[in-house]
């Protein structure tokens, strides 16, 4: 790629400044999301809490259906309702509880796209096929920043240049179907960042893209977010892809956070069997040649009738008697900013 | 090395394309029936615009001496029972038909489109109320509804347009509601919502442009139906009032002389048929071009 996207890349993520010393820009507390289905109520997000600090890049990791996207949609109040419903909790952004705002009220609309932007999994489907790239690119800018004497075309061209699309002057007049998936995602990133939001939420931003583009996209997002002093939340199911870009990781399972910590802690010293399983299922360069990836056996639990015990129990190779008789443990911290929801000390059991 | 630098993958991806519009026009020109329809409609429009120049006689000039004349050099299509030149009346009648067809459909598209978009997009109680009213209107046959309205409002061009457009609102509203419901589930609508766009903006800026191909196709075909509707109303005597030339009224006028002098009804009848057929063919052609799944077939 061009030097524009490689400029500030410095190998590992930025120095892990002790998060406690910074002020959280977004604090989610005990968030609950339910989906009403004919078979019963699905507790898609069941008491999730997390913080996001200024200038921080965080990943939310987990399998499909573990509530990671639902959490982010709830933060933006974008859940399809019915059947979705925010059943409780707080989303404190810059001192205000976003959940107190009316879903489509002007305050919430100002936050959406203006202060918290979101980009989605399928970039091609996220663009309106009948409008030119230029026309839709400026929409968020127009809504939140207003065109201050600039023409919308100039704004669009600048935005396209920002995300490294060549021949931007020509390409503004193209339609989405004339763009590749990676370029569409660049457009979405440009759109999301057009008004310098405080937070960018990227919901599986690389899933629909091929592997070579994935790295470019993450690199681009990281660099732009750094430049704008925004925070970035990357939702993904691929721990490997995000490892070098994020500072902290939240691992979710069955609608709850099962482990959280700095990237170093999660990779070097995972404390929850699920995290361990995720790590083992990602190929590594330092692995013995010919060794196999170890999948996590079984399926995530049915979220309609959850057992009172640990939701990972049926799939857990480390389970002890305590896991079967006692309820799912609370998130307990085992180190500086490193918390896990498990009775077992996985570290000890492994050795 | 310089060559390699030029071949940036992203630049290569930029196609040396024909614009979408050029492709559509190119495809349309290859369709015989579409071209036939387009030519007929163009001729009709020209005829309507230049009626005073084209018509050999004043369409309302009565010449009792010369009533029901057979086609001749003086009167190419003969004269009617009052001795008025049929060709001149046909040419002026094109104006009436075209005005009614375009105006009625335009009004129905706007009103039906807004109702359908709002109903489909907001859903819930709003949708239920709007769509049930539309269903009620739809249960009355179109011509009967127009007939009732025309009878209440009285004849005349304006009232005929109102009557026909009101009777055409339900199908447009249903089409638009159905389109809106599918479009609003697409990702770019939630993406737009995530940017903080208000609902009306999504409706006008996103839903409507995406629904336009379907509405354009259906609207074109409905122009034919509206012209037919006007002819029907005029034929029944509650449409365009005499002596204004209108094709439906001309058919009706020839009715008493059907055995003796059938040409009087046949000429305007064929004109109506031709124009309705032309609008249908153009609509068909547009559908084929605008629907990517049918593109390239047939």
Image: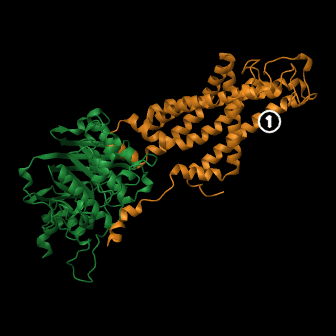
Chain colours: A green, B orange
Up the image or down, A107 lies above or below B288; here it is above
Mark 1 packing: few (<14 Cα in 10 Å), some, or many (20+)?
Answer: few
Up the image or down, A142 lies above or below B11; here it is above
Residue A224 spot, x, y in % from top left: 22, 53
Answer with the quarter of the image where residue A345 lies: bottom left
Residue B25 spot, x, y in % from top left: 59, 49
Chain letter of the residue beneath label 1 in the structure image = B
Residue B92 visible in the current orientation: yes
Quarter of the picture containing the C terminus of chain A is: bottom left
Residue farthest to the right, as pictured: B260
Answer with the quarter of the image where residue B269 lies: top right
Residue A83 or residue B98, whichever sits in front: B98
Mark 1: secondary structure: helix
Where is mark 1, residue-wise?
Answer: B270
Up the image or down, B71 lies above or below A335; here it is above
- B144 relative to A253 in the view: left or right: right
Q: Residue at x 79, y 19 (%)?
A: B60
Answer with the quarter of the image where residue B138 lies: top right
Residue B228 or residue A338, whichever sits in front: B228
Q: Residue at x 53, y 38 (%)?
A: B176
Residue A278 spot, x, y in % from top left: 24, 67
Residue A177 or residue B82, whichever sits in front: B82
Q: Residue at x 42, y 39 (%)?
A: B205
Residue B282 spot, x, y in % from top left: 66, 43
- A333 relative to A121 in the view: left or right: left
Q: Residue at x 18, y 42 (%)?
A: A93
Residue A320 or residue B129, whichever sits in front: B129
């Amino acid at each position: 790629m061009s030097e524009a996207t490689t400029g500030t890349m410095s190998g590992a993520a930025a120095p892990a400044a002790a998060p406690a010393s910074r002020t959280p820009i977004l604090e989610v507390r005990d968030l609950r999301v339910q989906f009403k289905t004919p078979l019963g109520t699905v507790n898609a997000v069941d008491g999730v809490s997390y913080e996001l600090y200024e200038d921080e890049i965080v990943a939310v990791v987990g399998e499909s259906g573990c509530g990671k996207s639902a959490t982010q949609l709830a933060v933006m109040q974008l859940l399809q309702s019915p059947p979705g419903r925010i059943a409780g909790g707080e989303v404190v952004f810059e001192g205000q509880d976003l959940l107190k705002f009316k879903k489509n009220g002007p305050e919430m609309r100002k936050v959406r796209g203006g202060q918290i932007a979101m980009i989605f999994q399928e970039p091609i489907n996220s663009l309106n096929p009948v409008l030119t790239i230029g026309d839709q690119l400026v929409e968020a800018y127009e809504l939140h920043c207003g065109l201050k004497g600039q023409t919308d075309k100039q704004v669009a061209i600048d935005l396209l240049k920002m995300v490294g699309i060549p021949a931007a002057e020509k390409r503004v007049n193209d339609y989405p179907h004339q763009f590749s998936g990676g370029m569409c995602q660049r457009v979405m990133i440009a759109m999301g960042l057009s008004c310098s939001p405080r937070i960018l939420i990227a919901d599986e931003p690389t899933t629909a893209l091929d592997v070579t583009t994935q790295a470019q996209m993450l690199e681009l997002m990281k660099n732009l977010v750094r430049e704008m002093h925004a925070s970035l939340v990357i939702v993904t199911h691929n721990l490997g892809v995000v490892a070098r870009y994020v500072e902290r990781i939240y691992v979710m399972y069955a609608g709850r956070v099962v482990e959280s910590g700095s990237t170093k802690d999660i990779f070097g010293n995972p404390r929850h069997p699920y995290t361990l399983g995720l790590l083992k299922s990602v190929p590594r360069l330092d692995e013995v040649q010919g060794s196999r990836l170890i999948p996590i056996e079984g399926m995530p639990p049915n979220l309609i009738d959850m057992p009172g015990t640990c939701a990972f129990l049926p799939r857990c190779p480390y389970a002890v008697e305590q896991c079967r008789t006692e309820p799912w443990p609370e998130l307990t911290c085992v180190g500086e900013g490193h918390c896990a929801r498990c009775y077992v000390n996985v570290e000890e059991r492994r050795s | 090395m310089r060559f390699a630098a030029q071949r940036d993958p992203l630049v290569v991806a930029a196609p040396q394309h024909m614009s979408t519009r050029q492709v559509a026009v190119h495809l349309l020109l290859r369709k015989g029936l579409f071209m036939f329809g387009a030519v007929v409609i163009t001729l009709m429009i020209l005829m309507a615009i230049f009626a005073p120049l084209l018509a050999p006689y004043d369409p309302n000039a009565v010449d009792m001496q010369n009533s029901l004349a057979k086609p001749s050099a003086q009167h190419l299509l003969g004269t009617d029972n009052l001795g008025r030149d049929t060709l001149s009346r046909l040419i002026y009648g094109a104006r009436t038909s075209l005005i009614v067809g375009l105006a009625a459909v335009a009004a129905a598209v706007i009103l039906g489109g807004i109702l359908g978009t709002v109903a489909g997009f907001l859903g819930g109680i709003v949708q239920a109320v709007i769509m049930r009213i539309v269903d009620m209107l739809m249960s009355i046959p179109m011509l009967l509804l127009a007939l009732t309205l025309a009878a209440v409002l009285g004849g005349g061009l304006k009232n005929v347009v109102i009557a026909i457009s009101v009777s055409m609102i339900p199908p447009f509203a249903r089409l638009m509601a159905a389109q809106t419901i599918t479009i609003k589930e697409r990702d770019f609508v939630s993406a737009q919502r995530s940017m903080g766009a208000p609902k009306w903006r999504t409706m006008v800026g996103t839903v409507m442009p995406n629904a336009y191909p379907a509405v354009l196709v259906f609207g074109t075909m409905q122009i034919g139906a509206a012209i037919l509707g006007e002819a029907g109303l005029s034929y029944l005597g509650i449409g365009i009032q005499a002596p204004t030339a209108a094709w439906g009224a001309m058919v009706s006028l020839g009715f008493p002389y059907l055995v003796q002098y059938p040409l009087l009804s046949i000429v305007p009848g064929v004109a109506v048929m031709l124009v309705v057929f032309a609008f249908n063919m153009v609509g068909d052609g547009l559908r084929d071009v605008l629907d990517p799944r049918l593109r390239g077939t047939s």
